[in-house]
Image (cartoon, coloured by chain):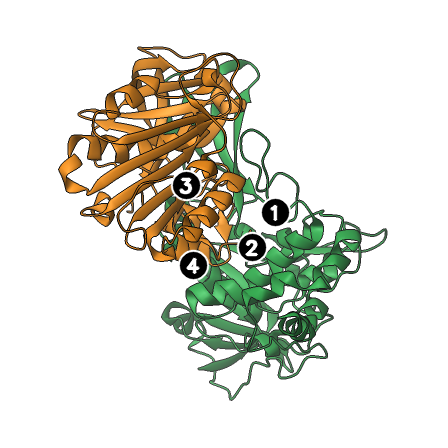
Chain colours: A orange, B green
Amino acid sequence: MVRNEYTPFLSEILQVKKHTDIEYTFRMAFSGEVKPGQFFEVSIPKFGEAPISVSGIGEGYAELTIRKVGKVTNEIFERYVGDKLFLRGPYGNGFKVEDYKGKELVIIAGGTGVSPVRGVIEYFNEHIDELKSLHVVAGFKTPGQILFLEDFAKWKQNMKIILTVDCAEDDTACHVGLVTEYIPKLELQDKTNAAAIVVGPPAMMRYSINGLLKEGFQEENVWISHERKMCCGIGKCGHCKIDDTYVCLDGPVFLYTKGKNLID
Amino acid sequence: MGYILDESSMQKVLDALKKDYIIYAPKRKEGEGMYSDTDCIRYEVVDKVAEIEFFEKSNYSFKEVLLPISQTLYYFTEDEVKEAEPERKKGAVIFLRSCDLHGVKRLDQMYLQNGFVDYYYKRLREAVKFVVIGCGKSYDNCFCVSMGTNVPEDFDLALYPGEGGYHLESRWDEITSIVGQLEEKEIRIPFVEENDVKVKIPNNLSIDIIKSSMWEEYNSRCINCGRCNFVCPTCTCFSMQDIFYTDNGKAGERRRVHASCMVDGYTEVAGGGSYRRKNGERMRFKVLHKVYDYKKRNGYHMCVGCGRCDDVCPEYISFSNCINKLEDAMKEVSNNG
């Protein structure tokens, strides 16, 4: 008989890291293959199931950065270290670090869009010599909403980091403005051969990609990741289908040449 | 091999099947139709041949036998998950028409081949035999000939109540051994060769059709009730639903229930974001899935031309008319070019 993909397994919460009032990173016990950009279906009986992307990977664990915005996530925030959540997955294709090796890489992320790329940044932070250079442009609404602040401080040693916020509440160390403003300012040797990853809200992705293409980036060197409703994660429930593409099976990571044709 | 059976011999065949199989067939439900004094024909377990509705199209398809409207996947108790038992312990024999048998191929594609194998579908799909019912005429809104689904491919039995009794063609050894004592007859199970409704899917159909103004009509006409999805033999979408027992709040079950791409909430993500808010956009999404993008992925069209969506629509929206508008709409979008 085939495997029952729908049956979740219990995973213990090993650590909870609070970023903002509504965004925590849950370190979940997990041993198995997992790639950045993949997702787990996280569930709590009675409240339901939600797809959450992997924001960090380590020996014996996978991290999920969760924003408290719905029925399931509200309930997840009631759980703490030692409690358990039901998981199934990981699903989806995820980012392949091999795609970027030997290149100048630019990562542009907005808000919780940082989660799916955090694993990519972590990998290259450890293996920075595998890239020609790495730029990370991350945008948040306010300084108080910045995720992974400690990580950014750590990553700064090995890569160029531009942290920007839409509006500053007070004097802040970060830039003010949209991520798109920083695209023309990127100092790269050869933009036509540079790679880019763009993840964030739909409008932010659209404008960022336009900006990159205007700077000479090639569509086939740009990767994106999509967020859609998914009830199964395994190509059955239909909710994430766009044209002939299932975001859960064929994505959520797409090369822009493919992703640009996905019109809901 | 062909045979002609009288009612009692046909009943004997059914009785023999009932030992190992549950028989599902279209059954007339008097007075249960969508308007007053109308009947509804839908799938149920049958005991007697006489209960089977052979002469009218069923309002709902066979798909509920393989994909229950609401299906319990597992039970929760505290920190444990227990897989639900299968809905039936026996095999199933399904009486259905040619279009619907072609529909089975689409369900198989989605649930057995598109990515992972679906455990619950596979479990119900195993040990299922198909009895195809001949169509003596084309019914209202049918367009199976245009969709190439008027003639069945793989079936176990073909049956038609014709002249002199039940005409039966058997490709099933077990049945052949039951009816084998009867004299073999030259029979021909009828299938539709022409429908009043014909559709033409333009060869140049492309995703540019999204830009056409043709979809706007449905913004006001469609009331997004989703009935077209629920009667469709090839609609496969579902949503998850958790149920908790009122007298023990710590125990409950997770179910999947049929979902509709026409109904609000289908694309809603946490935080309130959603796609395709307009009914015209939803209509476009559905139509293109049935006659465009499913084929791009799987090599043949999803729609089987049963016309049930047209039969059921309370706003008299015709799916086949919509398909026939695609050609002009392609001209419109290429002129805009």
Q: Nearer the viewer, mark 4 or mark 1?
A: 1
In the figure, residue B205 lies in which quadrant? bottom right
Dot 4 crowding, Cα within 10 Å, few <14, some 14–19, many 20+: some
In the figure, residue A35 lies in which quadrant? top left
Q: Which residue is mark 2?
A: B235
Q: Secondary structure at mark 2?
A: loop
Viewer-side residue, B312 vs A201? A201
CA–CA distance in space, label 2 to label 1? 8 Å
Q: Which residue is mark 3?
A: A183
Tag 3 and tag 1 share a subunit: no
What's the residue type where badge 3 is placed?
A: Ile
CA–CA distance in space, label 4 to label 1? 19 Å
CA–CA distance in space, label 4 to label 3? 47 Å
Q: Contact (CB < 8 A) between labels 3 and 1?
A: no
Q: Which residue is mark 4?
A: B108
The residue at 42%/23% (across/down) is: A66
Q: Secondary structure at mark 4?
A: helix
What's the residue type where badge 2 is placed?
A: Cys
What's the residue type where badge 4 is placed?
A: Asp
CA–CA distance in space, label 2 to label 3? 44 Å
Q: Chain of mark 1?
A: B
